[in-house]
C-alpha cells in the first residue's frame, strides 16, 4: 500500500465514509483514490477541487486567511475537502453518507492533511 493509501485508509475507517481521494488542487486530477464501487471519483474530484479553489480565493479576498476545510451537503450525502493552510498542491476529498459523524471525519481529515502538508 502506498503512503497515500495508508492515509486514505485512515479516513475510510470512519463509519459512513464511502471513500476518499488525494487530488491535485490545481486541476482536480486524482493522485490516489480509495472509493466504494459506484462512487464517481473523477467527477467528484474535479467538482470539489473547483469549489475549494473558489472558496480559498474568496476567503483570502475577504482577508480571513486561507480556507482549510470545505463541507458540501447534498441530498444524498456529504463532500469534504481539506488542505494544508499553506498553498500546497494536494487536497483531501472525502465522500460520505449524510448521517456520518462530521466531527470524526474532520478529526481524521486534519491528521491526513497534516501528513500531506
Image (tube, rainbow, N blue to C red):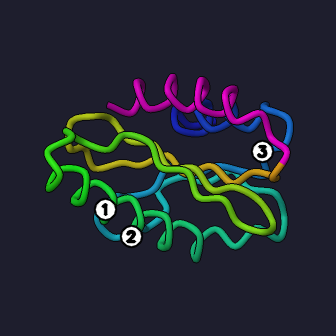
x, y percent for residue 64: 21, 41
- How dense is the environment of label 1, judged by Cα within 10 Å: few (below 14), some, or many (20 and up)? some
Q: Give the residue number, with chain letter if any, for mark 1.
A: 53
- How dense is the environment of label 3, judged by Cα within 10 Å: few (below 14), some, or many (20 and up)? many
Residue farthest to the front?
62
Horizontal arrangement in the rendering, residue 84 relative to residue 87 (left or right): right
Q: Quadrant of the C terminus?
A: top left
- Element type at mark 3: strand
Q: Which residue range is magenta in the image? A: 99-117
First in residue order: circle 2 vs circle 3 = 3
Examine the residues drawn in magenta and state their main secondary structure: helix
Residue name at image x 58 percent, y 77 percent: 43
- Element type at mark 1: helix
- How dense is the environment of label 2, judged by Cα within 10 Å: few (below 14), some, or many (20 and up)? some
The quarter of the picture where residue 37 lies is bottom right
The quarter of the picture where residue 102 lies is top right
Q: For the residues marked 1 and 2, what is the alpha-carbon distance in whole angstroms?
A: 5 Å
Horizontal arrangement in the rendering, residue 58 relative to residue 33 (left or right): left
For this rendering, which residue is in front, 31 or 90?
Answer: 90
* Badge 1 vs badge 2, beta-carbon distance below 8 Å: yes
Q: For the residues marked 1 and 3, what is the alpha-carbon distance in whole angstroms?
A: 23 Å
Position above or below: 61 against 107: below
Q: Quadrant of the N terminus?
A: top right
The tag on residue 17 is 3
- Element type at mark 2: helix
x, y percent for residue 75: 78, 69
Residue name at image x 77 percent, y 59 percent: 77
Q: Does the magenta stretch include residue 97?
A: no
x, y percent for residue 4: 52, 38
Residue name at image x 83 percent, y 71 percent: 38
The tag on residue 50 is 2
First in residue order: circle 1 vs circle 3 = 3
Amino acid at each position: 500500500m502506498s503512503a497515500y493509501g495508508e492515509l486514505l485508509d485512515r479516513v475510510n475507517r470512519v463509519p459512513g465514509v464511502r471513500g476518499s481521494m488525494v487530488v491535485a488542487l490545481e486541476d482536480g486530477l486524482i493522485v490516489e483514490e480509495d472509493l466504494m464501487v459506484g462512487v464517481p471519483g473523477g467527477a467528484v474530484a474535479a467538482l470539489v477541487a473547483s469549489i475549494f479553489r473558489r472558496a480559498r480565493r474568496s476567503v483570502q479576498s475577504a482577508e480571513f486567511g486561507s480556507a482549510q476545510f470545505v463541507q458540501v451537503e447534498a441530498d444524498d450525502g456529504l463532500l469534504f475537502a481539506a488542505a494544508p493552510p499553506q498553498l500546497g498542491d494536494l487536497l483531501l476529498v472525502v465522500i460520505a453518507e449524510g448521517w456520518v459523524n462530521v466531527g470524526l471525519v474532520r478529526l481524521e481529515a486534519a491528521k491526513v492533511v497534516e501528513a500531506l502538508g
